Amino acid sequence: MVERLSFYLERNSPLHRLNPTTKLVVAFTLILVAFLGRGLFLPSLIFLLILAPLSFLGQVGREFLRTTLNLLLPLFAFLFVMQSLFYPGGKTVLFGFWIFAVKLEGVRFAFLTATRVLVMVSSFLLLLLTTHPGVLLLDLTQRGLPASVAYILASTLQIIPQMQAKAATILDAQRSRGLDTSGSLGRRIRALLPLVGPLVFGSLVDVEERAIAIEARGFRSSRPKTSLVEIEDRPLERALRWLCLLAFILALGSHLWP
Amino acid sequence: MAVIVIKNLTYTYPTMDHPALREVSLEVEAGEFVAIIGPNGAGKSTLCYTLAGFVPHFFKGELQGDVYVAGQDIRHVRLEDWVLKVGLVFQNPFNQISGAKFTVYEEIAFGLENIGVPREEMKRRVEEVMALTGIADLADRSPYALSGGQQQRVALASILVMQPEVLVLDEPTSQLDPIGSREVFQVIRQLAHQGVTIVMAEHKVEWIAQYADRVIALAEGEIIASGQPAEVLTDPRLPEYGIGISRYTAVARQAAEEGLWPPHQRLPVTLEEAAAGFRAIEETDYARLR
Amino acid sequence: MRVCVENVHFEYPGGVKALRGVSLIIEPGERVAIVGQNGAGKTTLVKHLNGLLRPTQGQVIIGDWDTSQVEVHRLAQRVGYVFQNPDDQLFCRTVAEEVAFGPRNLGYAPERVHQLVEEALYLAELTDKAEINPYDLSPSWRKMVALASVIAMDTPIVIFDEPTTGQDARTIRRIEHMIEALRQRGKTILTITHDIDFCAENFERVVVMGQGQVLADGPKERILGMVEVLAQTYVEPPQLTRLGMQLGFETTVCTPAQFLETLRRRLGHYRANGLGRSEN
């Protein structure tokens, strides 16, 4: 029984009230600027001066920072160790020990890559924390995204927790029949078989029934669709989206400039 | 006027070598509540799928004979719009959750969005149907986080809200608690009074006897009995076919063998009939001794 | 083997309090049905008996084992649990292999496994289907395979979660025969059910649950007549019990035999003295 299917946190903040497409456009722009723009500190400044303050404006600051760190710290550690030691063509040795030498170029590269990834992950995270996935998909559908694509995206968001719940039930059923799922790796692999069969068979049956179910709800009806939720879109937001395009062009320009 | 007219329907699924339905003929009037009983595998679900157009349009396979619903030949309807005429609720409530929506309220509105109902009307209808099916308190829950019985109510509400002319239900109460099941039968009965035509496959004979207008018994793809609940549900052949009967009927049949049920009186199918019959026996006995 | 549930509370990670102080002692060989509305905590309770869930507070003792100290696969030696949906557990290529899976996991000798499988197949009326792939059987027969695969484990305690849901009369008869055979072997049998007539005819003790608590617990002849307590948790007395009440029977009847016996006695009573009939 999974109650929470996405990162979304319900708040009454200016960020939550923004049109989902605006937030999506801003997220993409920040990512593109971070990857295309010049300057070693550009991505980190985007994070510190734009994303972090926005998360507090959206009243999700704590969850934003905690989740970002949890997701990225292991990756950062790995990046720094690998790149600072093995970056090809590094000349400026900062310090060395045993057979290793930490090179400045490697550290710079690792820092830039890490902060770019940071902007990418945290932009999306902020979008997901402040935007209900259903509303985002609805808005995109109203802007021309095919309903079937939106459906696949929405149901994929839900299928993972569902599959987890189903797998947990199957695991419980087999443990109740004395299946030992602890112990050595070999034993655990052998214990997988009794779980995979029911999961696959169950999914096949489910797919057919689910197709019938959504058909029965008029999903492919030839009538024009309406929607339960009304999504606001203000002129100011439209202007903001144009501004984002401008920022993207500037970043692209600076990237291509010799 | 007959809303459903089936003549000599024989249908075979593409992967099967014998027909799931054989020579089935049936007429259902507007506003009639018809219950279908029969053992598992008798063809109840197939009949439900046929009325809803999924046989033959979704399952393909070979369909012989005629099936007319609301004057239209089922073979020539467009399945995607047919669902506006015939609503289908099937057994497994979990698989009836669309997956497209994140709350029960949105889930119930999903069908209305698809058929283009204006927002204000949509909200009114969703709220009405949630009250009718007793799930108003679940509005903001995730449909996936509900118990089987609650999901079953949501599945029913999601189809009722679309206000189809014909409502086809395949064991819609299987996971509900006893009083919950009876409530669903009451809601269905009420809809029939409002003119909705109902076809419902069910095992719960006590509520069928009380609420349905007519009962059809299926076995091995054929109709073996059809008529008033009192008539069909007391048919002595039902147990041979593996069809359940109510305890009232069963106990009265045993009593009749000992002369403890009024002679020449039809066996009871409801609590009231059983009570009246046994009371009469006690009273005649009492009177005879006076 | 005795089952002892002592003041068990359980809260799901989301904060839903599913059990709020449940206490229950089940003696060896008892047949107990747990009834109550959707969401009353029935499944949560029985999942405590084989360790799938562990109490947030209180304890569950099976024989001399505290379930919070013993792993689920070891508790499977003492408690067999048939899940509601057979498709959550079937995976073998033949019915016979499927039924042998549990007893093999428990480490029984090959001869004993063989014997237990034969017997379970016989009780489930599956002997002629032993070599068929479970997925080629109808859902009703898959249910019987799931039942057989758990009773073959020969545990002193067997739990059924909603065994009759979606089943037809013939399959319910088969399940009833199986329960009767288990009774003769002295097994403790527990079931969760919404089918109150099935409960009345196959079990001797009824536990009524509502909102995570035990509302009533005792012999079925006492519990199934408690109209108000049952209604609190969306349950009605069985058909014959209600009929007995309508006819003014002094005792609560649960089965056809009890009903007919009471009827005969009342009629005999009038015959004997003609006047002693209670007013109703």
Image (tube, coloured by chain):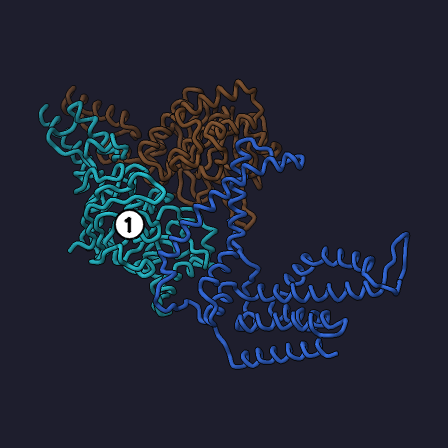
Chain colours: A blue, B cyan, C brown
Quadrant of res C224 = top left
| Residue drawn at point x = 52 percent, y = 73 percent | A19
Q: How many marks?
A: 1
Q: Position of residue A23 (x, y in %)?
A: 57, 71
Q: Residue at x 49, y 57 (%)?
A: A155
The image shows residue B233 at horizontal and vertical percentages of 21, 37
- Can residue A236 be seen in this snapshot? yes
Q: Quadrant of residue A125?
A: bottom right
Residue A97 % position (x, y): 90, 54
Instruction: Locate residue C256: give its quadrant.
Output: top left
- C122 is higher (above) or lower (below) than C212: above
**What type is the residue that disc 1 sits on?**
Thr
- B188 left or right, relative to B30: right
- Work out which quarter of the rendered image holds the N terminus of chain B and state it: bottom left
Badge 1 marks a residue whose secondary structure is helix
Examine the rendering and report whether any part of residue C207 can be seen.
Answer: no
Asked whether B20 or A118 is in front, the reply is B20
Q: Quadrant of the C terminus of chain B?
A: top left
Residue appearing at x 48%, y 51% in the figure: B145
- Pointer 1 residue: B50
B54 sits to left or right of B24: right
* B155 vs B115: above or below: above
Q: Residues within 10 Å of mark 1 (few under 14, many from 20)?
A: many
The chain to which mark 1 is attached is B
Residue A119 point in image, percent of width and height: 67, 67
Front-most of C231 and A205?
A205
